[in-house]
Image: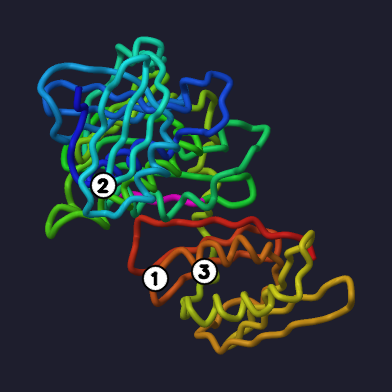
Amino acid sequence: MIVLKTTQDKVLASLQAVCGIVERRHTLPILANVLIRKHGSDIQFTTSDLEIQVRTQAELGGDAGDFATTVAARKLIDILKSLPADQTVSLTAGAQNKLTLQGGKSRFTLQTLPAEDFPLVQEAADFGPAFSVPQKTLKGLINQVHFAMAVHDIRYYLNGILFVAEGKTLTLVATDGHRLALAQATLEAEIPKQEVILPRKTVLELQRLLKTESKDAKDGEEDAPIEMRFAGNQAKFAFSGMEFVTKLVEGKFPDYNRVIPKNHKNHVTLGRAPLLASLQRAAILTSEKFKGVRLNFEPGSLAIASSNAEQEEAKEELEIDYGGDSIEIGFNVTYLMDVLANSGDDMVSLSLQDANSSVLITWPEQPGFKYVVMPMRI
């Protein structure tokens, strides 16, 4: 039976959309495979790592009839990548659990495992009301906060992003305990409060998929909506012919509203690019273990200084429109560079209190974004 017959680029695009979560090495060998399910000319590709399941559907030709199997996902992608983009390829089911991939004069015979052995994620029964935002909006929100997620933190609830949908607002928050990033967007319809923590792997995969969808979309398509539904232990996303189901991180996320400073009395707005460039130069003379820089705010000027164990020093000075208190404050330079490098805005605003209080960083052009960084002793 001819399972599919179409051009290389069409098959590859569908497979790459679902195969980001597939690990080459797994305790269950079948999890390295993609589930291929055929109904007439419609084909579903499904992958899973027991925590996340991704499914996409496409019309890829082939014979009529139903068929299902699983085959090594990465191997299939590697073979397809090696063939010309406009070449017609076919996938044929043969005897003895084999699939044959043919393109031009190239022919590959692959081993399969039974479709019924593939462990599909059991979907939750208690999903809350669905709501949607444009893909571009969600991608933008994730991009604004993802770098503040913790990596392998013992406080597992920090290894992800908090999604809060309430009323007409969608809020995303990420923190690693030293800094916190928050971004908001407006929803079209009011919904009751729903709060979930998406795992780090889910966030990075969503970010990859949304980026691909927007970049590859035809004119006007990139504002296609993504529909979201949250349950007690699962989240479900549907967009551009794809369905994405993920387990959630259990645990209580910190009260982010208490972390965000409200009454800092010293404020300064300055050019983002010049500040980033100065910090990048100062960072050259910080050590791998100690990334500290000193920022000295005086009326009219900002001095940036760093040093290392070899007694080397870097000093930078920027003219700024500032008339507040004289403040000398230390930061991990990476935390400042991350937020500045992650935006294309021209101006950045800083709100400060004193040397021992966190700083609030905002973008004048984006009222929904807030970034809080704890100071460090230098």
Which comes sooner in the sequence, label 2 or label 1? Answer: 2
Name the residue at 21% across, 38% down: 132
Asked if disc 2 and disc 1 are in contact, CB closer than 8 Å, the reply is no
Q: Which residue is mark 2?
A: 104
Rounded to the nearest whole Å, what is the CA distance between mark 3 and mark 1?
Answer: 17 Å
Q: Which of the two labelled residues, at mark 3 and mark 1, occupies the earlier sequence position?
A: 1
Label 1 element class: loop
Q: Is residue 377 above or below residue 231?
A: below
Q: Position of residue 146 (x, y in %)?
A: 48, 49
Q: CA distance from mark 2 to mark 3?
A: 60 Å
Q: Tell me the chief SS of the magenta region.
A: strand
The quadrant of the image that shows the C terminus is bottom right
Residue on which disc 3 sits: 350
Q: Secondary structure at mark 3?
A: strand
Foreground residue among 91 and 293: 91
Name the residue located 42 percent from the left edge and 30 percent from the top edge.
196
Closest to the observer: 260 or 231? 231
User: Badge 3: few (under 14), some or many (20 or more) residues near its Cα, within 10 Å?
Assistant: some
Residue 367 magenta-highlighted: no
Q: Position of residue 230 (x, y in %)?
A: 33, 26
Mark 1, Cα crowd under 10 Å, few <14 / some 14-19 / many 20+, is few
Asked whether 249 or 366 is in front, the reply is: 249
User: Considering the image in quadrants, where does the N terminus appear?
Assistant: top left
Whether residue 293 is visible here, answered yes or no, is yes
Residue on which the image places disc 1: 344
Magenta residue check for 183: yes
Name which residue lies at 71% across and 71% down. 293
Kindly identify the amino acid type of the residue bearing the numbered disc 3.
Leu
Q: Which residues are magenta?
A: 181-186
Amino acid bearing label 2: Gly
Task: For residue 246, say whether it is visible.
Answer: no
160 displayed left or right of 33:
right
